[in-house]
Image (cartoon, rainbow, N blue to C red):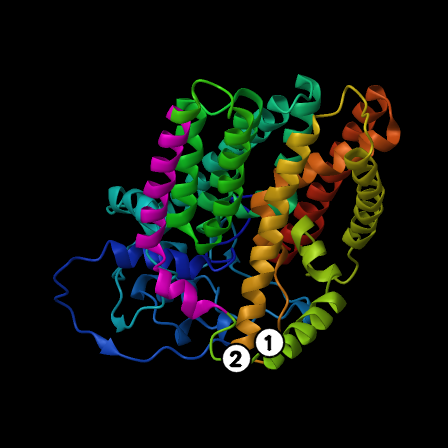
Amino acid sequence: MAALFPIFKGQDESRHYNSIQYLNEPAEKNWNIIKKPSEPYSEDRKIKFYTYNFSEEIRKTAQSTNSEAVFTPEDYDRMNFSDGFLGKNENEITDKKWDPYNKIYPPDIAGKSLYHKTVALIDKALYRENILIRYFSIRIFSVFLGMLCILLAYLIAKNIGLTSKQSLLIAAIISFHPKFSIYLTNINYDAFLIPSFFAFTLAGVSILGKGLNWKNGLIISTSLMIALFTKGTGVILFPVFFGLIMFHSYEIKKSKRFKTYLASSTILLIVLFLIFNSQYKISGLISVSPYTNKSSSEIIVSLEKYLSKTFLKITSPHADYWGDIDWVRNDYSEHLINIIWFAQIVALIGLVMFLFRKHKPDFLPEKKYVVFLFGIWFVLQFGIRFFDWKYSLSDPDLDVGTSGRYFLPAITSHIILIFTGLGMILKKEKYLDIALKIGLILIFIFFMHVIFNTIIPQFYL
């Protein structure tokens, strides 16, 4: 997947790579700088590299590879970037004729997150190489992060009480999830955010099962910090983290270790809060609140409009989340998406039965794990939609509607919840094993469909 997508064709990859190059610029900028205000974002502008304040190397490489050609999915155009075995103008690109720094200011960047600072080290270490080697080396680094995610998904499933085979099947389903695979092979800060959520989830189930110790305490605090310093989405893990601390406090309140635990957890919370405050100032939190400068009636009306708009678009982020790429006229993805919809509805019924009945099948996880995984899924859903609503408050004419990719950090929790619900309906472990195998076969078929019927024809035929 990392090799299939041509350069700059991943989600916002050009902006993220420009952020990396910007971080690697010399402190003394001894070249001519052109002042040019950034143009407002628009659907028309996002495919035209010459309108962005990118580095000369990015702009010229995009021009040489035909990456800035107008791409209209409605017309089913092909990108035509190849020239026989070589890419179009590949020799010109590998000659390194263009400077890898910004000559137009202010540069269009995606920030200076922990992810950008980390992969900037890879780009800097390979500074003697051409852009193709540097660029795809960072993509390969994302692949290793994706491999880490698969391992963490297996460990999460195993630690909540599923068998090794069931855990392996869940990890395999996630590994062939088309959208997950796309994002864990791209240059994008989600390549850091997603594994940090997975690690946080693993530490959380470990705390629920074994209590807080130095290992899972270190993992959960480290993963929380990585998430915070990678993307603002990491903020939503704080209420889950606080809930875990409160749950564990309740569990050991009669223990002799209670005072020691209470003191150490309080110190940990204070330290993490200070780190959080250094990244996102309290005043900044207040300023992004939708209640700022808005009357109660305006807020209620805005919320009603937002909910009505997003309800009508509920199928769009769902299809995008599962990996539907609407590039072809005869797309069979929607049939597989419909099967997933049906399975989720059945699973939801099973989850309600699971949570409200006193007894559950022995082969399913304990309720505390399911509630925790639901909490991870819920806070991500709520947080993403909250900020989407916030933006609609600032611009009432904004075309609201969240992209499905924003919900990928909770994909492990989501998949486990689906099969827990199905297991409750099916009642027997052998039927759950069959459901997991069917799920793997279906997601594998979907994955192959996306590659061979969508991506390859779009870029190579």
Q: Which mark is residue 299?
A: 1
**Nearest to the observer: residue 417 or residue 433:** 417
Q: Position of residue 340 (x, y in %)?
A: 79, 45
In this image, 400 relative to 387: left or right?
Answer: right
Q: What amino acid type is highlighted by mark number 2?
A: Lys
Q: Is residue 113 above or below residue 201?
A: below
Instruction: Assign the N terminus to one quadrant of the image.
Output: top right
**Nearest to the observer: residue 26 or residue 264:** 264
Q: Which residue is mark 2?
A: 294
Q: Is residue 287 above or below residue 238?
A: below
Q: Is residue 428 above or below residue 383?
A: above
Instruction: Assign the C terminus to one quadrant of the image.
Output: bottom right
Q: Position of residue 335 (x, y in %)?
A: 83, 51
Q: Magenta stretch mostly in which secondary structure?
A: helix
Q: Is residue 295 magenta?
A: no
In this image, 412 relative to 53: left or right?
Answer: right
Q: Is residue 262 magenta?
A: yes
Residue located at (30% from left, 80% from top): 36
**Nearest to the observer: residue 226 or residue 15:** 226
- SS for tag 2? loop
Task: Tell me the magenta residue range.
Answer: 260-289
Mark found first going from the N terminus, 2 or 1 = 2
Residue located at (53% from left, 34% from top): 149
Q: Is residue 298 above or below residue 17?
A: below
Residue furthest out toward the front: 254
Q: Is residue 44 visible?
A: no
Q: Is residue 126 visible?
A: yes
